Amino acid sequence: MSPVKDLSLLFYPKSICLVGASNNPTKWGCNVLHNLLMGGFEGTIYPINHKAGDVLGMKAYPSVLDLPETPDLAMICVPSDTVPQVIEDLITRNAKVAFIISSGFSEAGEPQSRMERDLASRAEQSGLILAGPNGQGLVCTGSKLYCLMAGVYNEEGPISIVSQSGNVGGTLMFNAYHHGFGINKFVSSGNEASVKLHDYIRYFGTDPTTRVILVYVENLKDGQAFLEACREVIPRKPIVLLRGGKTKEGASAAKSHTGAMATSTEIFDAACKQVGVLQVEDLNQMFQVATALAYQPLPTGNRLGIMTLGGGWGVLASDAASQCGLVLPKLSDQILREFSSFLPTFWSRNNPVDLVATRQPGSMTKVLEILARWDDVDALLMLGVGYGTRGLHMTQQSPFRDNPMMKMVADFVLQEDMSCAETIVRLIREVHKPILVCSDAVLGSRNIDNAPILHLERQNILVHPTPGDGAKTLSAMWQYAQFQQR
Amino acid sequence: MSPVKDLSLLFYPKSICLVGASNNPTKWGCNVLHNLLMGGFEGTIYPINHKAGDVLGMKAYPSVLDLPETPDLAMICVPSDTVPQVIEDLITRNAKVAFIISSGFSEAGEPQSRMERDLASRAEQSGLILAGPNGQGLVCTGSKLYCLMAGVYNEEGPISIVSQSGNVGGTLMFNAYHHGFGINKFVSSGNEASVKLHDYIRYFGTDPTTRVILVYVENLKDGQAFLEACREVIPRKPIVLLRGGKTKEGASAAKSHTGAMATSTEIFDAACKQVGVLQVEDLNQMFQVATALAYQPLPTGNRLGIMTLGGGWGVLASDAASQCGLVLPKLSDQILREFSSFLPTFWSRNNPVDLVATRQPGSMTKVLEILARWDDVDALLMLGVGYGTRGLHMTQQSPFRDNPMMKMVADFVLQEDMSCAETIVRLIREVHKPILVCSDAVLGSRNIDNAPILHLERQNILVHPTPGDGAKTLSAMWQYAQFQQR
């Protein structure tokens, strides 16, 4: 295979010019500069505006030709018909990397499509690495580079994203942010006139700070190179993929979005499966699978132990687990005896282990300890984390809030939930098995601080919103583990 | 059919006794009383504890026989072996309704199963309506009755829930609470020794304050009566159903939970389809479908218009819409002309209408207006509500926050997003078509106040987390609309 394209100046530039920087907040050239400043980029920033003057309080230059130095990275957001001249100027300055945010290229049909092809040829002849056009920009947390149309400032983490939709990538960034998770790199690859999906995948494959790669794809410009890139990278790092445009209607929408041509779903799915790409069904699942792969140990088998604080959750998780190829081993006589020594007589005596609403102090953590250390299971699912705490903020609003008895109840509940969360974090380290957790407290527009859930997510243990979600995530982890074992 | 069982004293009692009331926060008899007090029940409460004394500051009575009056509703949470005597005492006092929270009955096997059957016969002979056992309690917001193991205090709304799992029902209550939605009634039906699923469904069918009925089922004790109840109710009110125990593993978990016997999934699905029950796949979808049916007009056809702030979201929504039987009509020449008069030249010219990141003031609301009034669509999906606002809190934390230019950007973004949210609320009323909205800002453990999203949810317009979710909800609405049209 050809050498991996070196995209290090794209993600780690020391200087950036923004062509089309603007003071007008209805222009993206204003927002991108604003977000770049907000992100705290520590290199030099050169706003470029043909009227010069000041932009967002910084001195602006009329053109690339007027800059005091050649910047490592040129970001371009001017109308598409003015882009070719900017590229010529950059070539004149011997620039190394440019990213075209502007739309109005191949996704708009001819003659814009020809203009895009011409730009790509011109750049490739001149040794200019050209990303985009029609991409929303990029983020590299390690270099504090938040050069994106959307304003989102994740901390550093091991997950890198390449997306053929800026907004889809943005959703993943915001999902991470709203759960308190970091991101490594994000690039909105746009129309991929020159730098293509497989170039980003291969670069992420060699990037020492990336552990998991997420790909949103509508349009494979070079299917063979994509599959080769996956084959090269997957033995070292998992690739989680979501595909848009599977149906006729989706493909029609994709055509006006990225100019995608329909690909047979059957052929695509078979090829992905063969090289070990983990395909997911929606953006939530994508984020869930990504965080589990990034932060949890891989399971060494498909045997699942479920602990639940409610029967119905256990039933729904069992259905989901079974539907996605996991098995629920029967509890051994020894385990049955151990649980029976402290659980109420009417406990489920089954896997899922249903604590049937026992309020005996310490029961949850004891069950977790025993299940996690049980040799017959490779992974755990804990349903109902932060369950009691969920209701506490209401107690705080109550007229009874100063009643010592109410306080005692609240303290007890919080303490039990917290020790459960702490036990999960500790056990993952000690027994090297994944423990996935679920709680309905992570969905909604109105915040309710839930200390045990915040504790887990601060430790990078994602909380899944439904019992079935956790099972599906584990199934994907097991799929990758099997691929790695080969 | 037999007359509908009158459960009005169960949901609207003037007096309640709680058998097993306790000061010990590790006992459910403490939590249930606490939650009942917290909910602000305005009738009389009689704690019953065999040691008498005070419970949570209230005078307790040693037994039902010692009460100054016969309470309308008796809630029971004492160990199962002591329940028969409590029931005898209630019959002696000529009580009308009892709810057994205690577990340790048929779900625990024999001989507890026989005890449950005996209790049911005894109650039915004596005219005592007996709910449970092994149920987590019930809620009726209209009577401020929050008599539940979980502490959740929704406001009043039109959705009523009967669940064979207390925790599954609790999740629906918390989902509603976290989105700021009300609930009408919730009953955790437990083992249904006497009052059964179909009794609750039929009662909700006659209840003037209930508009949508949610059912979680593992175990149909009387399949024929259940189907007849659905057939009776569905022409007036939709029934949304989630079934647990579809797989061998799920059924095994259900057996230890509610003593459920496996039912053939094929037969169950076919019967549900025939009577018009809307089956859903998980708890999130259940809540999404419920709120749309409760608060939005039904679509009169399956033609969907999509407006999106990002191409990828539109592609994913188109895939989901197509997969669940919705169609995306092509934009007419007139609509194309209207949009082209104000959108950037490179807009998608397609349905989904992709605003391709235009920042022209008022574009979003204009597109919404035109699409909603277009005769060729029966429903709308708006992807990316609150999209700009999502990033604003970060601006507020920024060192640039006092920069007038930054303030201008923030004000502009918020104003556009808010007017979009307000337009959605107004258009639903004016054009009588459902408008479903999606945004990733409703998922996560860390709250970020998003004013447009809060505005929509305060107006009972639920925000769906992924583009596909909105399409699936619309498909369920269309399914019900077709059933009603017959």
Image (cartoon, coloured by chain):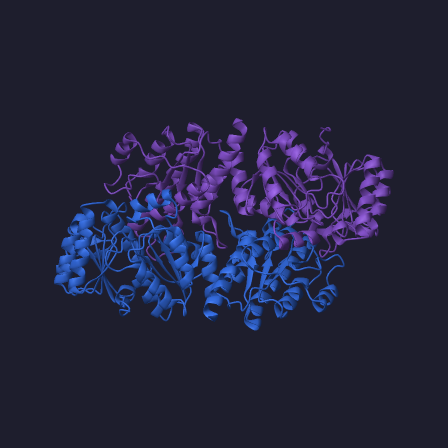
Chain colours: A blue, B purple
Residue B109, position in %: x, y? 77, 53
Residue B435, position in %: x, y? 43, 36
Q: Quadrant of the C terminus of chain B?
A: top right
Residue positioned most to the bottom: A430
Q: Quadrant of the N terminus of chain B?
A: top right
Residue B38 located left or right of residue B411: right
Residue closest to the eye, B65 or B84: B84
The part of the image, by quadrant, that contains residue A120 is: bottom left
Residue A471, position in %: x, y? 55, 57
On the question of residue A143 being in view, the answer is no
State the count of labels. Answer: 0
Residue A365, position in %: x, y? 64, 65
Residue A202 located left or right of residue B129: left
On the question of residue A319 being in view, the answer is yes
Residue A448 located left or right of residue B388: right
Residue closest to the eye, B160 or B237: B237
Residue at x 71%, y 33% (from the top left corner): B8
Work out whether B203 lies above or below B286.
above
